Amino acid sequence: MFFILQNEPVGRDPVQNAIIQDVLDHNKYSHSYEYVSIMDFYKDDTDEDIFTMKRVLKTPEDFDERYREAIPIGTVRFVEAYLRMFKGIERDNAIEIPPILRTEEFLKRKYSIVPRDRIPRQGSYFIKDATQQKVFSYKGELEYFLHDEMFREKTNEFDTSIRLDPSHLYQVSEIVNILAEYRVYVLNREINSMCIFAGDPLVFPDADLVRKAVRLINGQPDSPRSYSLDLMTTPRGTAITEVHNFLSVGLYTVDWDEELLYAFKHGMDYVKQHNTEQTEFTNF
């Protein structure tokens, strides 16, 4: 397999970069890679581009043939630029919590995925974009966060403020007391490892619930072969927080082998074959 690794330091975890490069170097007879800047995906500015402040993607013909089936690893923006150019795919759609797990057993809280006109303007909630990954998230009183300008279109390309896209869905969920947060790595539909990334390391998640969640996800016709499953332990018990396709997974543990490379391939396969769009839900 051929991988392209993003070489910009901004937005990239240097430890994660080192892990991936080390695994590739130890498997150099089976796999190859190159470092690429996200700006390498875009044409040089033209007068028209300057006026619109939008950069134009190059075409696949501007790259070596092997780039057509490469596996990109980098920020969401980097991966999605590759997907648009080489696969005609706008984005790696966020999975959030798969529909099969949207039950009280796995949620243990009020949880909804709704269009922007159903977002409450008051009340204390966790909110994030549930269509596009890593756009924004907020936890607290919505009255202090939401304002009318966020529901309007941007008037110019210099506007970097948060806007709520009318075509997107948004997660709005109850804020709960989180004791600890864990990430489970599922590689080729098998639980590979689990690590804590926040909270009390002695408050362990419910192993039976984790196994059941993985079994249910794996049983869906559009499930990724490799993914991460994020959990939180709370006074109400273990709850699922979100699922990530492997193209957008952060590595919170350092012990990896060649399986990691195939997990990224599975992430690309999922986007090409399924890339399931977000669906509305509420238990409020």
Image (cartoon, grey):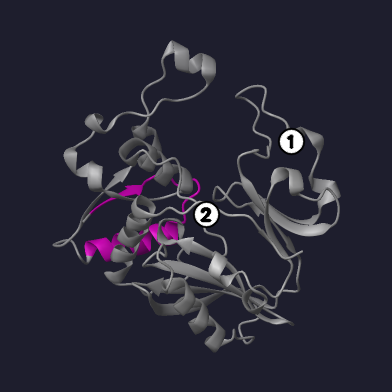
- The N terminus, quarter of image: bottom left
Q: Please provide the residue range marked out in magenta.
A: 2-25
The residue at the point 64 percent across, 33 percent down is 160
Q: CA distance from mark 1 to mark 2?
A: 21 Å
Q: Is residue 125 magenta?
A: no
Residue located beneath label 2 in the image? 94
- Please say if 9 is above or below 88: below
Find residue 71 and report its horizontal and vertical position in percent. 30, 51
- Please say if 62 is above or below 179: above
Q: Is residue 7 magenta?
A: yes
Left or right: residue 177 versus residue 188 is right
Marking on residue 143: none
Work out which residue is located at the far top of the displayed protein and give it. Answer: 47
The answer to whether any part of residue 253 appears in the image is no
Q: Indicate the amino acid at tag 1.
A: Phe
Q: Quadrant of residue 165?
A: top right
Dot 1 or dot 2, earlier in sequence: 2
SS class of the residue under badge 1?
helix
Q: Nearer the viewer, residue 146 or 216?
A: 216
Find residue 260 and report its horizontal and vertical position in percent. 33, 67
- The C terminus, quarter of image: bottom right
Q: Nearer the viewer, residue 66 or 84?
A: 84
Find residue 189 and report its horizontal and vertical position in percent. 37, 74
The residue at the point 33 percent across, 28 percent down is 58
The residue at the point 68 percent across, 40 percent down is 164
- How packed mark 2 is, by other alpha carbons closer than 10 Å (few <14, some 14-19, many 20 or more), is many
Residue located beneath label 1 in the image? 151
